């Protein structure tokens, strides 16, 4: 797949892409399909290496990539959500709304599509410097201990959450992030995705068990800090005790941006995916928003390359789209995330009781705003539903500091 030690210096490219994750490879595919010469720089030995992700992708999002369904492990039409005390809320639809994919194979499949269009991949290529010049972008990489330089007309940054690179490019930085920690385990009696809410288990976020094949599952925790420690606590705690029978892999961890990059473009440069903060604040998932960002960015960049105007003004359309998307889709999610982070386990328990007894969950499942990928509509519908419910009952959910009665 990758060229290691091959000719780098002296090659002329239209676009360099940093990162061979889904966003980077999807960008490489879309740009190469437009006829542009593209090179992808990946610091790992291959696409799909050391991935930390539950692999849950909506059916619509998966289909948009146009890759072989052989990477799908399971199809999900239901999920169970558990309160700190073990109260279960099960939601289901008549058909699959999401797939659990093998993320390593998924990444490889997207990279294969890009290479089939002519994109060239360089692995073991760690970017150490970027210079944006008047007529090109120069990227310096360390490849197997050797420093090499590549030049191109434009650069797409899709290398995940790396604040230092965005700062160096004058685009600012995302200051807040969470951490996801995950390990493969053997578990009995798991036939659907299970999500666990408790500030003791996953402060500010949640934990999960995701079935992948046979008795194998992914156990994970998303938390502000010390996610690896919380994963150990989760595996040893009441949610997993007696169910998780064996640990199959070591823990992998990944930083997850909670916020949007202040600027996602400048002269000759566009930023997409996790690097831009294109991540759902409610779940930490980034494949859908990242793919949407790639589509808009590549359309914008393709037109700019065509007319040979790669100024910031020529690329500003992408920035305007992302500001609008952030305001509409991400802002409500950030507010809900902050509110949830202030709740005690006792209040979360009350919230579960309210949702279960009020019929709110079923109403939202039937709502025209229901979407696996876009949550702002569901958030608005949920607030409307709560406001129409008797205020005395709804108010009990959040009454009292730290979960105590007021």
Image (cartoon, rainbow, N blue to C red):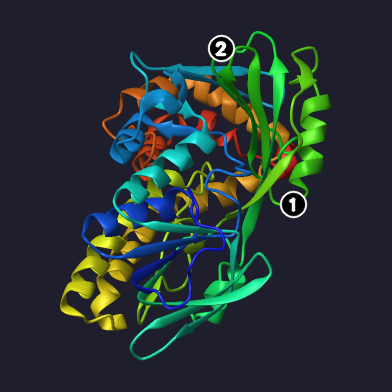
Instruction: Assign the C terminus to one quadrant of the image.
Output: top right
**Residue 233 in view, yes or no:** yes
Q: Which mark is residue 191?
A: 2
Look at the numbered disc 2 and give the secondary structure of its residue.
Answer: loop
Residue pictured at 41% horizontal, 37% vertical: 387
The answer to which image quadrant residue 201 occupies is: top right
Look at the numbered disc 1 and give the secondary structure of its residue.
Answer: loop
Residue pictured at 74% horizontal, 43% vertical: 402
Residue at label 1?
225
Residue 163 located left or right of residue 136: right
Residue 30 located left or right of residue 345: left
Up-down: is 287 above or below 59? below
Residue pictured at 25% horizontal, 70% vertical: 317
Nearest the viewer among 287 and 319 is: 287
Residue pictured at 34% horizontal, 16% vertical: 95
Q: Using a 10 Å C-alpha cutoff, classify the residue at mark 1 as few (fewer than 14 neighbours), some (14 to 19) or many (20 or more).
A: some
Q: Residue reaching furthest front?
A: 6
Q: Using a 10 Å C-alpha cutoff, classify the residue at mark 2 as few (fewer than 14 neighbours), some (14 to 19) or many (20 or more).
A: some
**Residue 203 in view, yes or no:** no
Mark sitting earlier along the chain (2/1): 2
Q: Residue 26, how many percent across, how many down?
A: 36, 51
* Viewer-side label of 2, 1: 2
Q: Residue reaching furthest bottom?
A: 134
Up-down: is 252 above or below 394? below
Q: Residue 297, how many percent across, how many down?
A: 30, 63
Q: Which mark is residue 53?
A: none
Q: Residue 330, how many percent across, how many down?
A: 43, 54
Residue 7 located left or right of residue 229: left
Q: Residue 25, how many percent across, how many down?
A: 41, 52
The CA span between labels 2 and 1 is: 30 Å
Nearest the viewer among 58 and 330 is: 58
């Amino acid at each position: 797949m990758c060229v290691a030690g091959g000719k780098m210096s002296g090659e002329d490219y239209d676009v360099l892409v940093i990162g061979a994750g889904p966003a980077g490879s999807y960008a490489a595919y879309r740009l190469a399909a437009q006829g542009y010469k593209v090179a992808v720089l990946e610091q790992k030995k291959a696409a799909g290496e050391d991935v930390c992700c539950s692999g849950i992708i909506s059916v619509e999002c998966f289909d948009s990539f146009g890759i072989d369904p052989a990477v799908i492990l399971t199809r999900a039409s239901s999920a169970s959500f558990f309160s700190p005390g073990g109260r279960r809320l099960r939601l289901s639809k008549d058909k699959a709304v999401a797939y659990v994919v093998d993320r390593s194979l998924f990444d490889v499949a997207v990279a294969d599509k890009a290479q089939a269009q002519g994109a060239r991949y360089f692995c073991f290529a760690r970017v150490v410097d970027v210079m944006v010049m008047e007529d090109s972008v120069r990227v310096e990489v360390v490849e197997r201990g050797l420093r090499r330089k590549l030049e191109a007309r434009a650069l797409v940054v899709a290398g995940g959450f790396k604040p230092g690179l965005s700062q160096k490019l004058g685009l600012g930085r995302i200051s807040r992030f969470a951490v996801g920690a995950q390990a493969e385990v053997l578990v009995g009696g798991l036939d659907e995705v299970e999500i666990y809410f408790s500030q003791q288990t996953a402060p500010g976020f949640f934990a999960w068990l995701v079935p992948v094949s046979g008795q194998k599952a992914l156990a994970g925790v998303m938390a502000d800090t010390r996610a690896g420690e919380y994963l150990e606590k989760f595996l040893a705690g009441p949610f997993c005790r007696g169910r998780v029978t064996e640990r199959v892999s070591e823990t992998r961890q990944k930083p997850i941006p909670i916020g949007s990059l202040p600027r996602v473009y400048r002269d000759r440069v566009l930023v997409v995916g996790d690097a831009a903060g294109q991540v759902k604040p409610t779940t930490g998932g980034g494949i859908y928003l990242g793919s949407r960002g790639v589509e808009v960015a590549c359309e914008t960049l393709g037109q700019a390359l065509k007319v040979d105007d790669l100024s910031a003004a020529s690329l500003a359309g992408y920035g305007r789209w992302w500001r609008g998307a952030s305001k509409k889709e991400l802002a409500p999610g950030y507010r809900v995330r902050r509110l949830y982070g202030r709740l005690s386990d006792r209040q979360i328990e009350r919230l579960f009781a309210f949702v279960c007894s009020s019929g709110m969950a079923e109403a939202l499942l039937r709502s025209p705003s229901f979407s696996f990928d876009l949550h702002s509509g569901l958030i608005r519908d949920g607030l409307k539903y709560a406001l129409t419910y008797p205020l005395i009952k709804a108010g009990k959910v959040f009454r009292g500091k730290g979960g105590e009665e007021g």
